[in-house]
Image: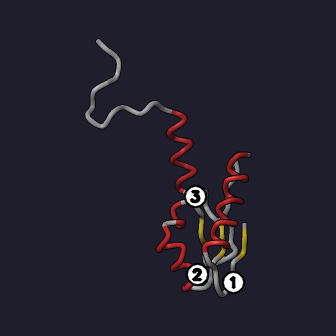
Amino acid sequence: MISLEKVRYIDSTGLGVLIGGLKRVREHGGSVNLVCTNPQIRKIFDITGLVKIFGISTTSRPLKRHSCERAKRRGRDRKREPRNGRTSHPE
């Protein structure tokens, strides 16, 4: 968990550092959760789409596992069928 509670400004360099850290943590099966109480900082994460890859909370209470991580686990546990409903195996 990374607290951004005292952060008043973040630019692309700061976002890049967080993304780099996230990549390293995910290599070891972990996740990164952010505590963000500043609405302007939260808006940056919304605009950039980073809310989809970070778990973001406005309090320091433990977060539920991020939905992207759950989706990845489900995808590993089952094979995906094509959207058209056809199987890729000849019958």
SS label for mark 3: loop
**Residue 66's spot in the image, x, y percent?**
58, 58
Tag 2 near tag 1, CB within 8 Å: yes
Image: 30 above or below 55: above
Which amino acid is tagged 1?
A: Val
- Of the numbered discs 2 and 1, the one sitting upstream in the chain is 1
87 with respect to 8 (left or right): left
SS label for mark 1: loop
The residue under the point 53% across, 53% down is 68
Q: In the rendered image, which residue does mark 1 sit on?
A: 7
Examine the image and state in which quarter residue 72 appears.
top right
**Residue 13's spot in the image, x, y percent?**
66, 72
Q: In the rendered image, which residue does mark 2 sit on?
A: 41
The quarter of the image holding the N terminus is: bottom right
**Residue 41's spot in the image, x, y percent?**
58, 81
Q: Quick one: label 3, few (<14), some, or many (20+) residues within 10 Å?
A: some
Image: 15 above or below 65: below
- Residue 81 is marked as none
Tag 1 near tag 3, CB within 8 Å: no
Q: In the rendered image, which residue does mark 3 sit on?
A: 66
CA gap between label 2 and label 1 equals: 8 Å
